[in-house]
Amino acid sequence: MRIDIITIFPDYFTPLELSLIGKARASGILDVRLHDLRSWTYDRHNTVDDTPYGGGPGMVMKPEPWGEALDAVTADPPEGAPEGETAAPPVPRLILPTPSGVPFTQAHADRLAGEPWLVFACGRYEGIDSRVAEDAARRMPVEELSIGDYVLAGGESATLVMVETISRLLPGVLGNRDSVDQDSFATGEMEYLVEGPVYTKPAVWRDHEVPPVLLSGNHGAVDRWRRDQSLRKTARNRPDLLEKMPPDRLDQRDRDV
Ligand code: 6GU
């Protein structure tokens, strides 16, 4: 997968050199390209913002640098499938991180992980002139996404969150595919549940014991216990998820928890 990120703070993305994502990049699974929006400005101060039409507080990002940046970044498509000649080049999908966007969920991540090419446009200030999205939508799908009900200073940290969430789903990035299926919010068994507590050695630490069932070797009992713990933790921390769970997702044992 190719990911282009356009930002006035390319240095914000040095964490993408580390850990899982750093390795995915080194191995060629993930091609992340950073672009400084100011390279598409031509005045002495490399201006990217201006006052809002209609008045009001703050500044708005000017459309011209964004238009040129998106044209340049999307001009050279990544190599498609190895059939080469016959395969059409992939279409980029533009992601606009904004607190006014659709709430980003694991389902978005699952879908976006199947795309060949994502472009993230990181806005600052009061946002990007709305004609940029309108113009881009003439040639590519555009999605406005929010990572939660709070306001960040800019789209950079939201982009880091989304890129990490998507990248760990790419084939070959996590050692163990199963760990993805067991995640909180994963589609399937865990769709309306969060994960319960986890333990490792030693079996006793500062008088705290690991729940004995986990040492029992009884896999059926372990699975049942984990599901119970997951239900209890979801009820405690995320009652909204249990509200949304279709009733047929609960068996009689679940109802007893
Ligand atoms: Cl994607 N951007 C900003 N600036 N604030 C946010 C957000 C995004 N998601 C939640 N708050």
Image (cartoon, rainbow, N blue to C red):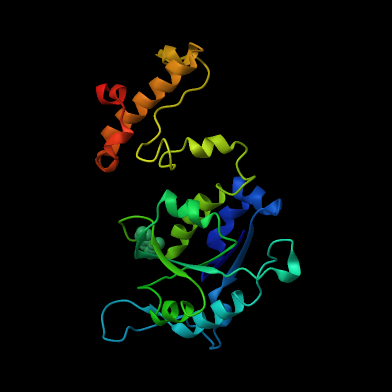
Provide residue 54's location: percent of width, then percent of height: 26, 86
Instruction: Give the percent coordinates (x, y) of residue 59.
Output: 36, 78
Q: Which quadrant would the N terminus be assigned to in this image?
A: bottom right
173 or 65, which lies in front?
173
Position above or below: 183 against 127: above
Of residues 255 and 42, the one drawn nearer to the viewer in this rendering: 255
Residue positioned most to the bottom: 43
x 70%, y 54%: residue:
28
Is residue 95 at all visible to an observer of this figure? Answer: yes
Left-right relation of 226 to 20: left
Q: In the image, residue 207 lies at what x, y percent? A: 41, 12
Of residue 246 and residue 195, the one placed in the foreground of this image is 246
Where is residue 159 shown, x and y percent of the image? 48, 60
Residue at 59% from the left image edge and 75% from the top image edge: 74
Question: Would you say 190 lies left or right of 43 here?
Answer: left
- How many numbered callouts? 0
Is residue 153 visible in the rendered image? The answer is no
Locate ligand 1 by image quadrant: bottom left
The C terminus lies in quadrant? top left
Compared to residue 143, the image places residue 191 above or below, namely above
Residue 118 occupies quadrant:
bottom right
- Report the residue at 39% width, 29% height from top: 196
Above or below for 43 versus 60:
below
Residue at the (28%, 77%) spot, across then down = 57
Q: Is residue 145 left or right of residue 219?
A: left
Q: Is residue 161 left or right of residue 34?
A: left
In the picture, residue 79 is in which quadrant? bottom right
Q: 67 above or below 145?
A: below
